[in-house]
Image: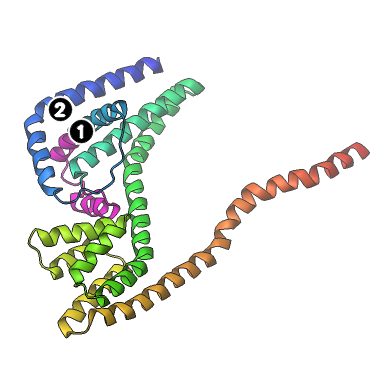
Amino acid sequence: MLAILLIGLVLAAVAVTLIARAATLSRVRVSQALDQIEAYGFETRGAPLVDEAAGTVRTFFDGVADTLGAFLTERLRSLGEQELREELRRAGFYRLSIRKFIGYRALSAVLLLGAWLWWTTIVGWPLAFGVVAAPVMVLVGWQVPIVVIRNRGERRRQRIDDELPELIDLLVVTVEAGLGFNSSLQVASERFKGPLGEELRLTLQEQRMGLTTTEALRNLLERCDTPGVRAFVRSILQGEQLGVSIGQVMRELAIEMRKRRRQRAEERAQKAPIKLLFPLIFLIFPAMFVILLAPAIFAFLDAF
């Protein structure tokens, strides 16, 4: 009975998706064109190659997510599009539209619900238990993508802060060698391949499109609002306003950045013992007690 219900839900979801795609086809095409314009200049280098089968599967899921996102965005106005845009920007997903991300959240909720109903069928749990827990599964599936995006954004920001001292050292060397600040950023963007390199290339792309160095650096700070990037941008802007040498500003900033990175490393080291308590207490200690105390317990029982 539950298997028939699951198949019916899947078929109903497919039918609703096709109807919604047919109803919003013109709007989807317009939104795709706007997304291409909005994502101009945000493409990163070194994109991994995928085979044809994986590309076909990804295209299919992209289409389904795009349709669901367009359907939900038009009918729900309280999805927090601005907050989602900021989260995607922090995570580095510049080419992923808000509509498609909302569609992926809905798709994740549907897939988790289907997996939960399938699991209750396999295990043989009561139907009432599966139906009662279904809203919880839908809520969890809806929140999983945003949690993944936030974790990725936090790791990306930490990596940018960790790479800033090397960037500043390279800028000091190139500026003192006679290059201008923009030329030094160009050299640094070619050497750094991670998130920091992507942000530098995007900053240079904005300058080529007509923005000034000040505006491009402020946009960099808006995209990566970390303590290190904040100190870097403000030092450059204040140095230009006060007429201080960029090389001298960079040297002082490099010393400060290394102190901050050392403080973050010390903070992580101090947190490590507390984090180790939980696996020690719940995983390692029980196994040790079993190995050490089990022979004594069996000998004590044999004695009685």
Kindly identify the residue that appears in the image at 50 percent across and 70 percent down.
266
Q: Nearer the viewer, residue 98 or 140?
A: 98
Q: Is residue 58 left or right of residue 215?
A: right
Residue 183: percent from left, percent from top = 19, 67
Where is residue 230 shown, x and y percent of the image? 27, 70
Name the residue beneath numbered marker 2: 20
**Any part of residue 259 in sight:** yes
- What amino acid is found at the position of numbered circle 2 in the picture? Ala
Would residue 261 be counted in the magenta stretch? Answer: no
Q: x and y percent of residue 141 in the render?
A: 35, 38
Circle 2 residues within 10 Å: few <14, some 14–19, many ≥20: some
Q: Which mark is residue 220?
A: none
Q: Residue furthest front?
A: 177
Asked if residue 304 can be seen in this view, the reply is: no
Q: Tell me the residue at 21%/21% (across/down).
A: 15
Label 1 belongs to which residue?
Answer: 68
Q: Dividing the picture into quarters, in which one does residue 29 lie? A: top left
Residue 71 painted magenta: yes
Split into 4 quadrants, where in the image is the C terminus?
top right
For the residues labelled 2 and 1, say whether their Cβ atoms are less than 8 Å apart.
Answer: yes
Q: CA distance from mark 2 to mark 1?
A: 7 Å
Q: Residue at x 20, y 33 (%)?
A: 68
Q: Is residue 207 left or right of residue 178?
A: left
The magenta-colored residue range is 67-94
Q: Nearer the viewer, residue 300 or 61?
A: 61
Residue drawn at 34 percent across, 61 percent down = 160
Mark 1 Cα shell of 10 Å, populated few (<14), some (14-19), many (≥20):
many
Secondary structure beneath dot 2 equals: helix
